[in-house]
Image (tube, rainbow, N blue to C red):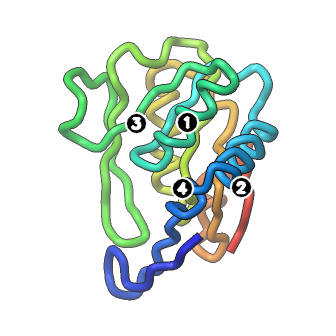
Amino acid sequence: MREVPDFPRPGVVFRDLTPVLADPDALRAVVDALQDKIDPDTQVVAAVESRGFLLGAALGYGWRYGVVPLRKPGKLPAVSHRVSYALEYGEATLELPEGAVQPGQRVVVVDDVLATGGTAAAACSLVEAAGGVVTGVSVVLEIPALGGRELLAGRDVSALLAV
């Protein structure tokens, strides 16, 4: 993992997992470790743009889950639900593709980093708005000092590494 100071804004330290994703053995180890923490009755991975797409696709392929991309605004031709939320350094919006999550489907939310929890909480809200059941939130890296778990209280949250 690489730390990039002052990105995307001064005072923010961006945790870049690109070196991990670029290394085939490291990528396999991360995806396998994420899978070990996913509820066995899960049917779908809700993958958060954009690094979550990479992890979600690998999980979906390797363990036969469906994969649903949670996108930034303006990227989807048909949107069923959208939610805006606060980030450590601003605000953002996520959208769920129309018809991608069916009522009752068991869905795990996957992303690279859990910081303030806003993105993960928004992703859970999208899944539940479509009638899905969130089985957990799985991330590679958690930054506990930013309190993201507090925003996800009552949810099964797993992180492979905390810094």
Pick the front one: 28 or 134:
28
Q: Secondary structure under badge 1?
A: helix
Q: Earlier in the sequence, mark 2 or mark 4?
A: 4
Q: Identify the residue position indicated by label 1 in the image.
A: 56
Q: Position of residue 26 (x, y in %)?
A: 68, 55
Query: Residues under labels 3 and 1: Cα distance?
Result: 11 Å
Q: Helix, strand, or loop for circle 4?
A: helix
The residue at the point 68 percent across, 51 percent down is 153
Amino acid carrying mark 4 in the image: Ala
Q: Which numbered disc flags the more N-terminal residue, 2 or 3?
A: 3
Residue 80 to residue 87: above or below = above
Q: Earlier in the sequence, mark 4 or mark 1?
A: 4
Give the total of numbered labels.
Answer: 4
Q: Residue at point 37% right, 29% down?
A: 96
Decide: is 56 above or below 106: below
**Residue 22 image label:** 4
Residue type at mark 2 is Ala
Residue occupying the point 23% across, 41% down = 73
Of the numbered discs 3 and 1, the one sitting upstream in the chain is: 1
Mark 1 residue type: Gly
Quadrant in which the N terminus is drawn: bottom right
The residue where tag 2 is placed is: 159
Residue depth check, mark 3 versus mark 4: number of the one nearer the observer: 4
Residue 141 relative to residue 66: left or right? right
Question: Where residue 56 sits: x, y (%)?
Answer: 55, 36
Q: Which residue is mark 3?
A: 70
Q: Which mark is residue 38?
A: none
Residue found 58% across the figure and 38% down from its top: 109
